[in-house]
Image (cartoon, rainbow, N blue to C red):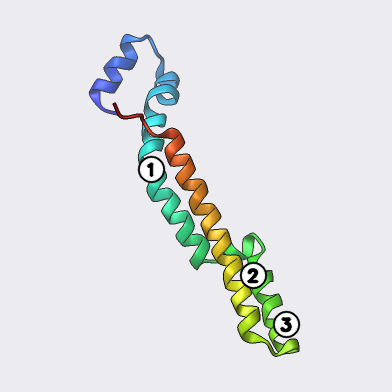
Amino acid sequence: MTRGQHEAAESLGLNYWQKMRLVILPQAFRQILPPLGNQFVYILKMSSLVSVIGLSDLTRRANELVVNEYLPLEIYTFLVLEYLLLILLVSQAVRWLEKRIAIPSH
C-alpha cells in the first residue's frame, strides 16, 4: 500500500480491514488479473489440472476409441477441438472479467 492510499483511506476514517477491502484489494486485483488469467490458461493446457476437471477421461476415452475403431485422425481431431473450446471459453471469461473490473478511461 502506498503512502497516498494509506493517507486517503485514513482521511475517510477507514479501519485496516476496510482499507484492504475497499482500497487496496480492488487495485491489486486489477493488476494481478491479466497475468493470473494467463497462468491459469497455461496450467489448464499443460498440467495435471486437466485431470482434476475430468479431461484426462476424455484423453483416455479417445485412446480407447482409437484402439477399437482405428480412426485416430478423426478421434484426435475431435479431442483437440474439445480442448480448444475449453481454452477459448476460459480465455474469454478472463477477458470479460478484465473488462468488467477495468477503470474507465476519460
Q: Earlier in the sequence, mark 2 or mark 1?
A: 1
Judged from the image, the secondary structure of the residue bearing numbered disc 2 is helix
Q: Residue at x 52, y 61 (%)?
A: 44
Q: Are marks 3 and 2 in contact (CB under 8 Å)?
A: no
* Label 1 CA crowd tier, 10 Å (few <14, some 14–19, many 20+): few
Q: Residue at x 61, y 66 (%)?
A: 82
Report, in whole angstroms, how far the alpha carbon at label 3 lies from the one at label 2.
14 Å
Q: Are marks 2 and 1 in contact (CB under 8 Å)?
A: no
Looking at the image, residue 33 lies above or below residue 60: above
Q: Quadrant of residue 78?
A: bottom right
Q: Residue at x 48, y 57 (%)?
A: 41
Residue identified by numbered label 2? 56
Looking at the image, residue 81 lies above or below residue 101: below
Q: Quadrant of residue 105?
A: top left
Residue identified by numbered label 1? 32
Report, in whole angstroms, how far the alpha carbon at label 2 lies from the one at label 1.
29 Å
The one nearer the camera, 41 or 13, is 41
Q: How many marks?
A: 3
Residue identified by numbered label 3? 65
Q: Position of residue 10 (x, y in %)?
A: 33, 13
Judged from the image, the secondary structure of the residue bearing numbered disc 3 is helix
* Label 2 CA crowd tier, 10 Å (few <14, some 14–19, many 20+): some
